[in-house]
Image (tube, rainbow, N blue to C red):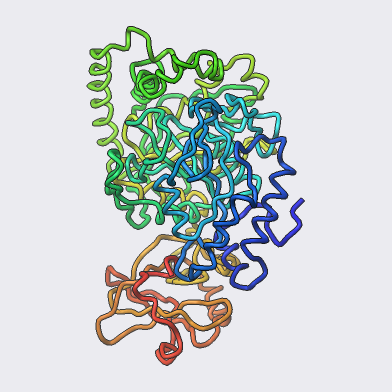
Amino acid sequence: MKTTGLSQTLSIPELKEKYQSKELTPESVIFEIIHQAEADKEYNIWITPPSMSWIQPYLDRLKLMDPEQKPLWGIPFAIKDNIDLAGVPTTSGCSEFAYTPAEHATVVERLIDAGAIPIGKANLDQFATGLVGTRSPYGETKNSLNPDLISGGSSSGSAVSVARGLAAFALGTDTAGSGRVPAALNRLIGYKPSLGAWPVKGLVKACASLDCITVFANSLSDALLVDDVVRGFDGRDPWSKSIKRRTNALPEKICLVQEPLSFFGPFAEKYKQAWELAVDRIEKLGIPIEYIDGSYLSEAAAILYDGPWVAERWAELGEFITENQGVAFPVTEKVLRSGAKTEHSAAAVFNATHKLQEFKQKAQQQLKNAVLIMPTSGGTWNREEVRENPIETNSAMGLYTNHCNLLDLCAVSVPAEDAAENLPFGITAFSNSENEQLINGIADLFLHGRRSPKKKETTLVAVCGLHMRGFPLEKQMIEHGAAFIREAKTAPQYKLIKLPSIPPKPGLICLNESGVSIEVEVWEMPLTEFGRFVSLIPSPLGMGKVQLEDGTEIPGFICEASAGKKGEDISHTGGWRHA
């Protein structure tokens, strides 16, 4: 049971707000996390658990940082133990393999530079080979909601650390679905960027050509804030690419596969019903739906473990396995050794590569300005069932995930309605690697919904500060019947200031001379609620016309020009989320 002002699950905006109000300090948060980690010991979340002995230097560093300039100042995060944290062993789930890195992985370094606090190295399916969370000599990671069930893997400890309220976010990895399956099974967001968008320097490779570092979080906005911090090219990483994530947008259409879907395990019928409810919800989003041929997806997925791509895992780890026979987890060693089969010849690799290219082209054409939505998983298992049948149960978990990286897709898994009590169910949105804005836009719409009253009964409202999603006053928007529509930018004629209030809030000032474009959110609010909402706005803020980048004008938050003399000009940040 938590003993401080911490919520059951952690959110970045809430922690920031409580730090600003002095209700919490990073030290008090870390003490509570250490206490709670000990209480949750039976979940087998950690390989290197939270300890003040090695966390303290990161707390000390915060004193040298300006919280206003560090977007993740004081935010605790967990790290999957195949990603390097300097001075702390990286085991990849195998103590005999362990080494102690001298420097952080690139993504970890960027997070720490942004003020985030690493709190522990999380358990995983050994060598990131598995989707169940049971393939670890450090113990089977238990599901955060039902300990008899699997947690999902391989990023098992990372997901459960977030779901149990021990971290605001956690780094995982994803080669075949390891950043998405545990998210769905623990009612989390699992965000998998495009291949290369996040550097993988400092990651123990599974399949180097397919590996991604990912994030688990309790909200999409938290996941995308982490993405803002870690995304970017790293010249030291041969797999790194410069892929810019654009402002969230909605696709022209949603694709669903025309083939009947398969559901498995002891809860198969409940999962099928949960998917049918999700489809009904998708149909009400107001976006055209097209049923497409998805038969090639499973054929592509089979190349990963039934085809020559498994040889890439052997190329990475074969020497260690050969020189240390019997050291690896038995089922893990069996999977890895399958990569040494003689049928995985150079010719087989090229044949598979050419087949994959055909599939990639088909996916590119189907998903042009579109997203594909599928269940993240078609079922789940009791941990005992996985022990008794480790190969087939694990294979089933990748039914709707394995194709993703092979086809160079981006993906985000989000919670849908639970299949049953304490039995989460998730869906995944996929698109082409250059279309991350579409999967984020549709995920946000699915999560938050949109009311569709007649236009004459509603008004659009532009918000630029504490009323945005994930911030403390979002609840006022919801209380007044508003629904999020999209992200946008103002015309380049504005100035953004930070008002000297408690808590700080932004003020959007229209300039007669040239200004900058500021990020805003567009919401839709019933006219019957608009007047009551406006009455709550304190001076020097008010409601006026805000001109958007496309030239349209809608009601929105503005600030009296005189307040600009008292506030700090933060226009250079481009918006309150980056201030």
Residue 126: tell me if it is visible.
yes
Residue 432 picture quarter: top left
Task: Give the answer, above or below, for where 543 lies relative to 428.
Answer: below
Q: Position of residue 17 (x, y in %)?
A: 59, 68
* Residue at (57, 76) in percent of width and height: 503
Q: Position of residue 58 (x, y in %)?
A: 54, 57
Q: State which quarter of the image contains the C terminus.
A: bottom left
As drawn, is 516 to the left or to the right of 170? left
Q: Nearer the viewer, residue 336 or 142?
A: 336
Q: Position of residue 94 (x, y in %)?
A: 54, 27
* Residue at (53, 61) in percent of width and height: 470
Q: Residue furthest top?
A: 342
Residue 493 picture quarter: bottom left
* Residue at (70, 29) in percent of width and height: 148
Task: Give the answer, above or below, for where 330 lies relative to 448.
Answer: above
Residue 460: tell me if it is visible.
no
Count the marks.
Answer: 0
Q: Nearer the viewer, residue 345 or 546?
A: 345
Q: Position of residue 518 (x, y in %)?
A: 35, 71
Task: Give the answer, above or below, for where 255 lies relative to 403.
Answer: below
Q: Nearer the viewer, residue 256 or 548?
A: 548
